Amino acid sequence: MPTTTLEERGSYVADHLVIATGLNERPLRPAWPGLERFPGEVLHSSAYRNGAPFEGRQVLVVGFGSSGGEIAVDLVEHGVRVALAVRSPVNVVPRRMLGRPVEEVATLLERLPVPVSDAIGRAVRRLRFGDMTRHGLRFAPLSPTRQVNERARIPLIDIGTVGHVRAGRITVHPGPDRFEGERAVFVDGKELPVDAVVLATGYRVG
């Protein structure tokens, strides 16, 4: 098919140009031993649409970033039994703080000295979520602000995931070690039969 030049499509004049080609270009799909022989469906979060096809089934969501947390909630709301594989300690922030969207509050916290914003972030996390270790979730030692600034990682903005974990509607497991048939085997040696796996494992730069 012949291509057209910019001049043929029309010219554009602007004061600034934004190259929005993105960092989230190529889905990252880790390869655990046995996953290629897993009999159920395996899909990356980029291919996930909604939980309706999984109703009544057991689904393992690998990863606890924003995609993993939101997909887990959607699956629960569609009547799915959900397990979350969480490899490392996590940072979670409420959707709203002090009656304001958390993004707005985060912008204000960035103007404060780091020790002050750290203390506020830790206090909010403790008051809002409490101790989640008995439910399998470990909170990161870094405050949400420092995690963004030092590691360029965005905390999970909670839309109800933590509440579902606390209520037992989402079970939390450590990272996967391997798959044996329909069973996911975790690094602590425990096993779980699953019908499908959703890989909320991020992207590579494209």
Image (spheres, rainbow, N blue to C red):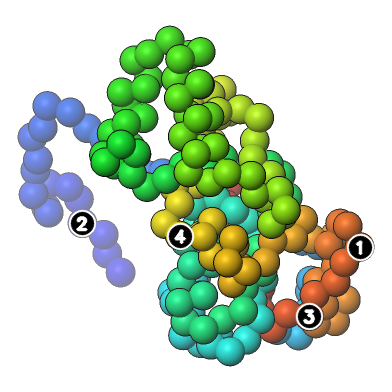
Quarter holding residue 184:
bottom right
Q: Nearer the viewer, mark 4 or mark 2?
A: 4
Query: How far apart in space, not on screen, are marks 2 and 1 (Cα)?
Result: 58 Å
Q: Nearer the viewer, residue 57 or 35?
A: 57
Relative horizontal placement of residue 144, taking residue 197 as reference (left or right): left
| Distance between the alpha carbons at the discs numbered 4 and 3 | 25 Å
Q: Label 3 belongs to which residue? A: 193
Distance between mark 4 and mark 2 Cα atoms? 48 Å
What separation in Å lies between label 4 and label 1 (alpha carbons)? 29 Å
The picture places residue 34, in percent across and down from the top left corner, at: 85, 71
Mark 3: few/some/many CA within 10 Å (<14, 14-19, 20+): some
Residue 81, by quadrant, is: bottom right
Q: Label 4, secondary structure: give it.
A: loop
Give the residue type that dot 2 points to.
Thr
120 or 201: nearer the eye? 120
Going by the numbered disc 4, the residue's amino acid type is Gly
| Mark 3 → mark 2, Cα distance in angstroms | 53 Å
Say which quarter of the image contains residue 54: bottom right
Which residue is drawn at the image coordinates 71% and 48% (left, top)? 133
